[in-house]
Image (spheres, grey):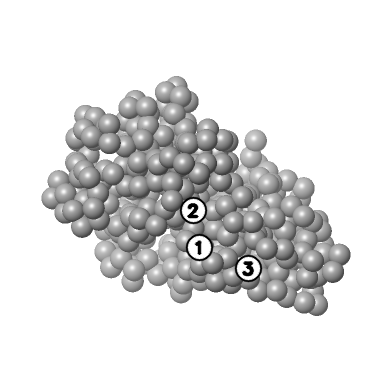
Amino acid sequence: MAFTDWFTEYAERDWQQSTEGTVRYALVGLGWWTTDVALPALEAAELCEATVLVSSSAEKAGRLADEHGVDHGITYEEYHDGAAADAYDAVYVATPNAYHLEYAETAAELGKGVLCEKPMEASVERAERIVDACEDAGVPLMVAYRMQTDPAVRQARELVEDGFLGEPVQVYGNNSQPLLEMIPDENQWRLDPDLTGYGTSVMDLGIYSINTTRYLLRRDPVAVEARMSSHHDAFDAVPDERSSFLAVLEGDVQLVSTASQRAHTDTQLKITGTDGQLELRPAFHGECTLYASDGDLTVELSHDSFGAVEETTEEFDYFADRLLSEARIYPDGEHGLTDMRIIEAIHRAADEETAIELD
């Protein structure tokens, strides 16, 4: 096949099954991600809208509801009591990790679909309880892996599926950011193990390399090794200010990943095969760009190549489409649990300084 023949027009929203109907979301947790990213994404969505905002502060919930034209602003306590339950169909949980369970359980009890931010919870055991609660209540559960709806990532997936790489051989992923410059608070929740979970860099950043690789290659790790260290006083309670790990995927594909919450911003994912190479750079934050190379020629597919589609809007519409059509959810609870088990194994491998095999 000629090199250019690999690149056909991107099949926009190849996942979409529904063209009618609207899913109403309650947004639980009004931190910067929800206010700066999720709310604007929902305002641009086609199949869904925000109708309820939930916060610890009644004043904040009401103020933001007024600012964004959202019908209801309620407190966490009111949410658990079922306030405004008739005004929404699904819940987006974007609180600190260790609080996901309680809000997912309430959503399940109320019969609402659950879109839970990644990572699913602070531990494998608590993530399992989310899955059980949703299964017992018969409500849909999706983990919010927005990269799976990014057009550049979906184009990369199509190329992998069509055989562009040949046989996958190795993967390199990195995700780093200067957390204390972004949020100048040494007591923030991402540095509190009671709230974040096993650590900070792998839980919050390394998970992108893990999950995006799993999505692209449809292969899971069978063994991991890892190294971690913390140096700054703000990271005293977490083990992984700096982290690296090696994961052996099914078929003996080697994944090497680095992640740090105290480093220059950099995100990339590179997959090398016997016949070609795919690279996402920037990969996980910013306007994701895909580079595809066969060794002699390289094609760059920028954010604008896909009509500047915003992946968080796609994520909300994807889940809405699944609720409206009852089609299969790919990043469901079991999918998210696999990532949690991988992350737990990575931390255990670093702590025990040995390779850990995964079942």
Question: Spatial distance from mark 3 to mark 2, Cα to Cα?
Answer: 18 Å
Identity, as a three-letter code, of the amino acid under mark 2: Glu
In the image, is 43 to the left or to the right of 250?
A: left
CB-based contact (under 8 Å), mark 3 and mark 2: no
Disc 3: CA contacts within 10 A as few (<14), some (14-19) or many (>=20): many
Q: Position of residue 244 (x, y in %)?
A: 56, 60
Identity, as a three-letter code, of the amino acid under mark 1: Val
Query: In the rendered image, is residue 185 in sight?
Result: yes
**Label 1 belongs to which residue?**
309
Of mark 3 and mark 2, the one earlier in the sequence is 3
- In the image shown, does 164 or 265 lie closer to the viewer? 164
> Does residue 260 lie above or below 103 as drawn?
below
In the image, is 221 to the left or to the right of 4?
A: left
Question: Spatial distance from mark 1 to mark 2, Cα to Cα?
Answer: 8 Å
Q: Secondary structure at mark 3?
A: strand
Query: In the rendered image, is residue 344 in sight?
Result: no
**Label 3 belongs to which residue?**
290
- In the image shown, does 199 or 159 lie closer to the viewer? 159
Residue occupying image coordinates x 70% and y 55%: 158
Identity, as a three-letter code, of the amino acid under mark 3: Leu
Outermost residue, top side: 136
Residue occupying image coordinates x 77% and y 55%: 162
Q: Position of residue 20 (x, y in %)?
A: 46, 41
Residue 180: image quadrant is bottom left
Residue occupying image coordinates x 57% and y 36%: 328
**Label 2 belongs to which residue?**
314
> Does residue 309 lie above or below 352 as drawn?
below
